[in-house]
């Protein structure tokens, strides 16, 4: 019996008991074995979160463009426009300019909250959280408490790349990146003060399948400690992993994270429509954000022009034979206008 076939049999018996070597073998599944793996992962998805295909309506904004005090009026208008278009979430990506001063990050949070009270702000990766605390001369926890009090609702679990220090150094051109221990400490602290976060893996670069499995195990360990991850998102590296490898990774992530991270996102802007549909048949349950651009300043987001209509999402749900449901950032039901 091949290693993949043996691992599939083990997963069918009890996916929660899979060993690391078995998980590594599953990452190599192809052909009929890949289809079997996808089917197993989809059954686990169905048992964990049901049949709904979920999405959030959000707007991405570039912190370098909206974080300076001179841009606060523009930020106010962009957030109000997003809310008027039906967004329940605003994401700020990237650092706030140094010209914003020592409290620039906190003041951006306050500005978003004033513009649209009740909208969920999802902002600041671990490196930006650390920078924000450093700028104001406070501890990380003190900044996070202040930001949560001002209206920050969650933080992106990005900048994780691959949670292996050697791989991170290789990806950073041979220069040490934010250490894994510091990334974990930052995310755990955010969870401890009541903020949720996504969890991510950038795959298809220099990492090995064993390092991918170790990354997933580390995320599961953090989730077991804090319960703070809302979803897992696998993102392809610029090198471009194959569709086969992408499907196998999403399926294995569903198996290894079951009971720790409920939702697995098929990040449609990264995968294209055909592969996104395959991922949603192989363990994923969420589409992520529709990514509104608006008309005031469509280029204010880092993914400007990348949008998915409700009609497009509904057509995909119909092909899958699953109900489409709008969600909030934390997977609740949006308030009815």
Image: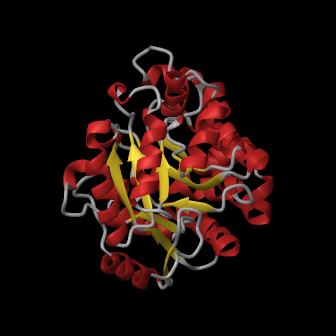
Quadrant of the drawing holding the C terminus: bottom left
Task: Name the residue at 76% across, 51% down.
Answer: 18
223 to the left or right of 158: right
* Residue 145 image position (x, y, % from top left): 64, 41
Q: Nearer the viewer, residue 329 or 134?
A: 134
Q: Is residue 94 above or below residue 263?
A: above
* Residue 92 image position (x, y, % from top left): 40, 47
302 to the left or right of 102: left
Residue 198 visible, this orientation: no
Q: Is residue 336 above or below residue 144?
A: below
* Residue 174 image position (x, y, % from top left): 44, 14
Q: Nearer the viewer, residue 291 or 150?
A: 150
Q: Nearer the viewer, residue 215 or 195?
A: 195
Residue 69 visible, this orientation: yes
* Residue 177 image position (x, y, % from top left): 50, 21
Task: Name the residue at 64% across, 26% down.
Answer: 139
Q: Is residue 114 above or below residue 72?
A: below
Number of callouts: 0
Task: Name the residue at 50% across, 64% down.
Answer: 118
Task: Name the residue at 52% across, 25% down.
Answer: 136
Specify the quadrant of the image occupied by residue 99: top left
176 to the left or right of 148: left
Residue furthest to the top in view is 175
Q: Is residue 61 above or below residue 130?
A: below
Specify the quadrant of the image occupied by residue 16: bottom right
């Amino acid at each position: 019996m091949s290693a993949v076939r043996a691992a599939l049999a083990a997963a069918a018996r009890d996916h929660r008991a899979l060993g690391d070597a078995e998980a590594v073998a599953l990452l190599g599944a192809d052909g009929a074995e890949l289809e079997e793996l996808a089917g197993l992962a989809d059954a686990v998805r169905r048992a964990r979160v049901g049949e709904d295909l979920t999405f959030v309506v959000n707007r991405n904004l570039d912190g370098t463009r909206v974080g300076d005090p001179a841009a606060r009026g523009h930020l106010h208008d962009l957030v109000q426009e997003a809310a008027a278009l039906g967004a329940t979430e605003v994401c700020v990506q990237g650092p706030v300019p140094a010209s914003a001063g020592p409290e620039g990050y906190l003041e951006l949070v306050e500005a978003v909250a004033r513009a649209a009270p009740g909208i969920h702000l999802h902002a600041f990766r671990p490196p930006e959280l650390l920078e924000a605390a450093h700028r104001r001369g406070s501890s990380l926890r003190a900044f996070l408490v202040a930001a949560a009090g001002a209206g920050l609702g969650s933080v992106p679990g990005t900048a994780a790349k691959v949670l292996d220090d050697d791989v991170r150094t290789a990806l950073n051109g041979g220069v040490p990146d934010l250490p894994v221990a510091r990334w974990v400490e930052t995310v755990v602290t955010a969870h401890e003060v009541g903020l949720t976060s996504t969890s991510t893996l950038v795959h298809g670069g220099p990492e090995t399948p064993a390092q991918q499995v170790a990354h997933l195990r580390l995320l599961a360990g953090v989730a077991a400690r804090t319960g703070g991850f809302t979803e897992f998102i696998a993102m392809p590296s610029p090198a471009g992993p194959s569709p086969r490898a992408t499907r196998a990774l999403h399926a294995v992530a569903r198996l290894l994270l079951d009971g720790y991270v409920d939702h697995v996102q098929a990040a449609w802007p990264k995968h294209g429509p055909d592969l996104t549909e395959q991922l949603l048949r192989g363990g994923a349950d969420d589409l992520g954000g529709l990514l509104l651009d608006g008309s005031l300043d469509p280029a204010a987001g880092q993914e400007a022009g990348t949008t998915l209509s409700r009609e497009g999402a509904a057509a995909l749900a119909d092909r899958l034979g699953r109900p489409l449901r709008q969600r909030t950032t934390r997977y609740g039901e949006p308030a009815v206008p």
